[in-house]
Each structure stands twice: as structure tokens, then as C-alpha cells.
Image (cartoon, rainbow, N blue to C red):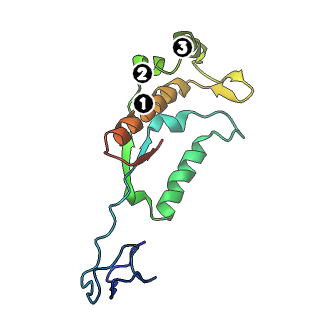
Amino acid sequence: MRSPGVTATGGAVHSACPPVRCPGPGTVRDTPLPPPAPLTTAFITHPSFLLHDMGEGHPECPERLTAIHDRLIAAGLDGYLDHREAPAATKEQVLRAHGADYVARLDAASPAHGYVQLDPDTALNPHSMDAAWHAAGALVLATDLVMGGAAQNAFC
């Protein structure tokens, strides 16, 4: 990390100097180096993510998302994030990664109430598919932001 107001002389690189060569012999850097450009991290979420509850004791739970956000606030990092709400992905976007039969089977399995167990680790509740469409939309948005230069990275 650069230290503001650091000076260096004689063209030497000193441990207190930023990792750049100082001006030529006998000169002094009178002005501090500008601060580095801030990292831009997109933090993409959606209210539906908190409704995708896999049941008691499952690590994929709404409390996990709340704990992540609380920790970012406690660490003083939340204000540095570019908060975005995830749009729902389009069917066309999802079909670029998943087969139409797979998507149709998930839609058909989505319960009106309660849980449907898809495998030993994966369940659906009535809100899971909405969360899934928005999770896919978060990934599309994250990719667009990073590839377009609006963010250096993203957390979904």
C-alpha cells in the first residue's frame, strides 16, 4: 500500500517509498503519489435469495446470506461495494448453460408448498425457482459488469 507524503532522494528506492523509482539523483518528490484507483466490486443479490430455504440444518440457508452482509458491514467494507439487485435471467440466457429438459424438470418439480427433495443435498421450496432465476441473472449481470469494465470483480 502506498504511504501518502513519502519522499525519497537520490534516485534510490527506499523501503518507505512506494514501489516505484524515485526521480533522478539529487531530486526530491515533494508531492505524494495519488492513491491507487479503488477496486470496484459489484455485490449482487436479490430478496428472493432469502426465501430459498433448504430446511433446518442445511448450510445453504438465508442466515448465511445475512451473516455475509453483516460481516461486510462490521469490517467496514459494505460502503465500498457497488450494490446491485439481480434481475431474473431470461430463459434464453439460462438455456446457454442448461438443457431445456433440465430446466423444464426443475420447473415441474417446484412445489406449491413444502419441500421437494431433488437429491440428498438439494431441495426446492415454493420460492426456490424464483431465487434460481435471479441467481442466474446475477451471474449474467456480474459478467456484463466485469467484461464491460464497470466492475473489476463481483460477488453474487
Give the mark nearest the N terminus, 2 or 1.
2
Give the mark nearest the N terminus, 1 or 3.
3
Residue identified by numbered label 1: 137
Q: Which residue is drawn at 50% across and 30% down?
A: 131
Residue 93 is marked as 2
Three-letter residue code for mark 1: Gly
Three-letter residue code for mark 2: Gln
The quadrant in which residue 102 appears is: top right
Looking at the picture, does residue 108 appear above or below residue 61? Answer: above
Indicate the position of residue 64 as horizontal and vertical percent values: 60, 46
5, 47: nearer the viewer: 5
Indicate the position of residue 4 as horizontal and vertical percent values: 33, 79
The quadrant in which residue 39 appears is: bottom left
Give how far apart the Cα atoms at labels 2 and 1 are. Answer: 8 Å
Instruction: Point out the image quarter for the N terminus.
Output: bottom left
Instruction: State the SS at label 3.
Output: loop
Give how far apart the Cα atoms at labels 2 and 3 are. Answer: 11 Å
Q: Residues within 10 Å of mark 1 (few under 14, many from 20)?
A: many
Q: Which-is-in-front pick, marks 1 and 3?
A: 3
Q: Do the residues labelled 1 and 3 touch (CB within 8 Å)?
A: no
Q: Residues within 10 Å of mark 3 (few under 14, many from 20)?
A: few
Indicate the position of residue 53 as horizontal and vertical percent values: 61, 34
Indicate the position of residue 47 as horizontal and vertical percent values: 45, 38
Residue identified by numbered label 3: 99
